[in-house]
Image (tube, rainbow, N blue to C red):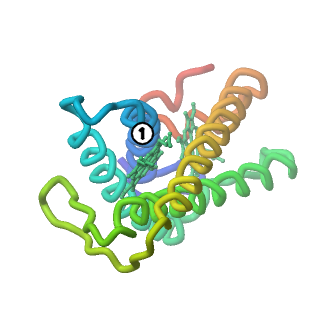
Amino acid sequence: MNLKNTSNTYGSVIKFLHWGMAIAIFALFGLGVWMRTLTYYSPWYKPAPHWHQSIGVLLLALLVFRFLWRLANERPNQDFLKPFDRIASHTVHIAFYALLLVIMVSGYFITSVDGSSVDVFNWFSIPSIYEKQGAEEIAGFIHWTLAYAIMALAGLHTIAALKHHYVDRDITLKRMLPNHWFNSSP
Ligand code: HEM
Ligand code: HEM
């Protein structure tokens, strides 16, 4: 089991982070949309945002680690891709990092611009660093917009991965999957 990427495939650290974070991001999106429908009298009115922001902050730490890990690793060989696909996939990957960073930071500001700290699973809390009346509306708008933009990008990214697998029949998807699937044919 290779922890690091090789010129041929992704390493297990990137695979684990890729799939683990993808599940968590889809779950946070669903949780976010659902928790906005809750009324004050729902038993989930407080726990749902608490879970949403706690998972979100942990994802921020993983995102920073993942980006540094990516920089410290070689990128598996892309020579078989058309130049357009190579540039498009690289642009989408970088856009994911940027959008995820901003959605997480905007989430922190929604909670903290009124001076509250962000409690992460009651393990630790991150104090407010900026207070401004009404700024939660702006942070909330950015957060909402980016949540839908990330879902749209993830849809496009998934279609591209499936197209490479089933239409082009190349190794793009296989080398992001666990090793024992690597040799199975599409
Ligand atoms: C990948 C990460 C995240 C995703 C996909 C996500 C997604 C969402 C979505 C879809 C909503 C509902 C938006 C609406 O209908 O107005 C929401 C609301 C919210 N999120 Fe996130 N979120 C993420 C990270 C975070 C983080 C890190 C925090 C805090 C530290 C956070 C705090 C909040 C809060 C407080 C709301 C409620 C906003 C309001 O009531 O206006 N989120 N999120
Ligand atoms: C919110 C969900 C997702 C996000 C944020 C995401 C993000 C990324 C990022 C940033 C990369 C580049 C490698 C890295 O730096 O880690 C990547 C690669 C990849 N992703 Fe996703 N991904 C998501 C969901 C999916 C899904 C659902 C699929 C397939 C069904 C998929 C298939 C792939 C494949 C095949 C690669 C390798 C592409 C290549 O070698 O050029 N991803 N993804």
Which x, y percent locates residue 16?
38, 45
Q: Dot 1: what SS?
A: helix
Along the line of sight, which residue is nearer the eye, 43 or 83? 43
In percent of width and height, residue 133 lies at: 44, 70
Residue, x 39% and y 69% (percent of image)?
Answer: 113
Amino acid at pointer 1 = Gly
**Left or right side of 178 for 40:** left
Binning the other alpha carbons within 10 Å of mark 1 as few (below 14), some (14 to 19) or many (20 upward) gives some
Residue 58 spot, x, y in % from top left: 31, 57
Q: Does mark 1's beta carbon lie closer than 8 Å to ligand 1?
A: yes
Q: Is residue 143 above or below residue 158?
A: below
Q: Quick check: 174 above or below 127?
A: above
Total numbered circles: 1
Looking at the image, the residue that sits furthest to the left is: 123
The quarter of the picture where the C terminus appears is top right
Depth check: give the residue in front, 70 or 40. Answer: 40
Q: Quadrant of residue 90?
A: bottom right
Relative to 81, is 160 above or below?
above
Residue 44 is left or right of residue 85, and the answer is: left
Q: Residue furthest bottom?
A: 129
| Point 13% across, 60% down: residue | 123
- Which residue is labeled 1 in the image? 32
* Foreground residue among 59 and 110: 110
- Residue at 48 percent across and 35 percent down: it is 177
Q: Quadrant of residue 117?
A: bottom left
For residue 155, which quarter of the picture?
top right
